[in-house]
Amino acid sequence: MALGGYIEPLTRLALAPIVAAQTWTSKQYQGFKEFVTAPRDVTVIRQQNAKLNAENARLQAQIVEIQQQLTEYEILSALLDFARAHPTHQYLGATVIGRDPSPFLHYVIINRGSDDGLRKGMPVVTQKGLAGRIAQVTARGARVELITDPSIIVNVRIQPSRSEAILTGSITGDIVLEQIPQDADVVPGNLILTSGLGGNYPPNIIVGQVTSVKSQDFALFQGASVQPVTDFSKLEIVLVITNFNPVEVAPLIPIPETP
Amino acid sequence: MGIFLAIPILSIATILQSAVISRITLLQGTADIVLLIVIAWALQKNVKTGWQWGLIGGLLVDFISGLPFGIYTIGYLLVTGLTLALQARIWRLAVLVQLFATFVGTILIHALSILVLVIRGTSLPLQDVLQTIVLPSLILNLFLAIPVYSIIRELAGLVYPEEIEI
């Protein structure tokens, strides 16, 4: 009968509730199993999550560090190029560690001092050009007076006209050219280099570029605004020219005799 | 106890001032965190070391500044005196005194700096100085005055806990 398929409907009828019951039981078991094991999994996942977060934070910090190193490398590489382009000078690299607390002074503090051979008056450059000169030295640090400081005066030469002029800073951080001869042909875009006159800075260091010229017929001299090549808001590493000794001209100035 | 705290706290503040705060500028103006701390400390109840904090803060800033030595010391001591005088009269409104002393103190220290620089022969166009340094510095100092006051009040509360009468 079975082989003949006569029992098939009966078997189906009998098995149907069994299968249904087994399905229900299995579902309940699965639910129970999940209920029992789930908290354990959450704990594991949380642990893994915490570990991954820590790993992520570590990698992020590593990326920032590598980016900093890359920036530093780029600056050092540019400084090296500058040093190679001016082989007559001896340089000492220094890191800018602070700025003057007074907003009236355009000074930065570097991490090299008299212990490293620095002396007052030594010129300070960046990979792009002149930055300033050392105003004060301590054993392990020095204060650099930037060319944007209102009290600074740099003797410069304008290229290509080769006219001499005086560069001064200002309280706003802008730098201007003064005492340009009236007959000098100065136009925006001209390069400004140190002239070496006065003996405070070595000659032929780039300072900036003329952005605008102020010329009046009745004035004795022309004036000009200058865009410095160095971005003073982003000074990080500088080079101090250690084999340049500024000339002290004070003893050469005659003192008027009192009657 | 207050005097022993002055050296580490004001040293850290001076380092922060030179390394960080001075790089955060509004036009050419910068905040003066040491000044704010000196004022806030002088304003705290039970604190008797306001003058010492003013002196130490001034000496530390003078040490790293290119201005002639003593400008900040004199300035901070004058501001401390002003703060203590105001506190004695309107002690219930310490936050207002902090703001007022910050306003007057910023102008006073800038006036001293300008005076010294003019005597030294530095060219300082008054309008540029006011627009690019004094007013922006004033805004930054007033902006930071209340947060600094809150931090220093917490610190003073730890150092000088209030006595409770039973």
Image (cartoon, helix red, strand yellow):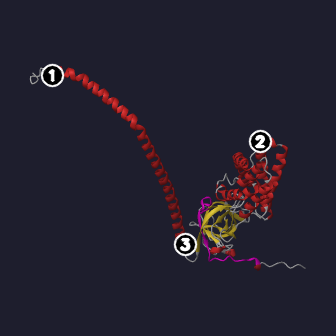
Location of the C terminus of chain B by quadrant is top right
Q: Residues within 10 Å of mark 1 (few under 14, many from 20)?
A: few
Q: Are marks 2 and 3 in contact (CB under 8 Å)?
A: no
In which quarter of the view is residue B5 placed? bottom right
Q: Residues within 10 Å of mark 2 (few under 14, many from 20)?
A: few
Q: Position of residue B113 (x, y in %)?
A: 77, 59
Residue denoted by label 2: B164
Using the image as rendered, state which of residue A182 and residue A140 is in the foreground: A140
Using the image as rendered, state which of residue A39 and residue B8 is in the foreground: A39
Q: Position of residue B122 (x, y in %)?
A: 76, 63
Where A166 falls versus B143 (above or below)?
A: below
Residue denoted by label 1: A8
Q: Position of residue A121 (x, y in %)?
A: 68, 72
Alpha carbon separation for disc pair 2 and 3: 69 Å
Using the image as rendered, state which of residue B115 and residue A71 is in the foreground: A71
Alpha carbon separation for disc pair 1 and 3: 99 Å
Asked if residue A80 can be seen in this view, the reply is yes
Location of the N terminus of chain B by quadrant is bottom right
Furthest-right residue in this view:
A259
Q: Amino acid at mark 2?
A: Ile
Q: Which label number is shown at residue A83?
A: 3
Q: Residue at horizontal 58%, vertical 73%?
A: A91
Alpha carbon separation for disc pair 1 and 2: 93 Å
Q: Residues within 10 Å of mark 3 (few under 14, many from 20)?
A: some
Using the image as rendered, state which of residue A98 and residue B88 is in the foreground: B88
Which residues fall within the magenta stretch? A228-250
Q: Which label number is shown at residue A119?
A: none
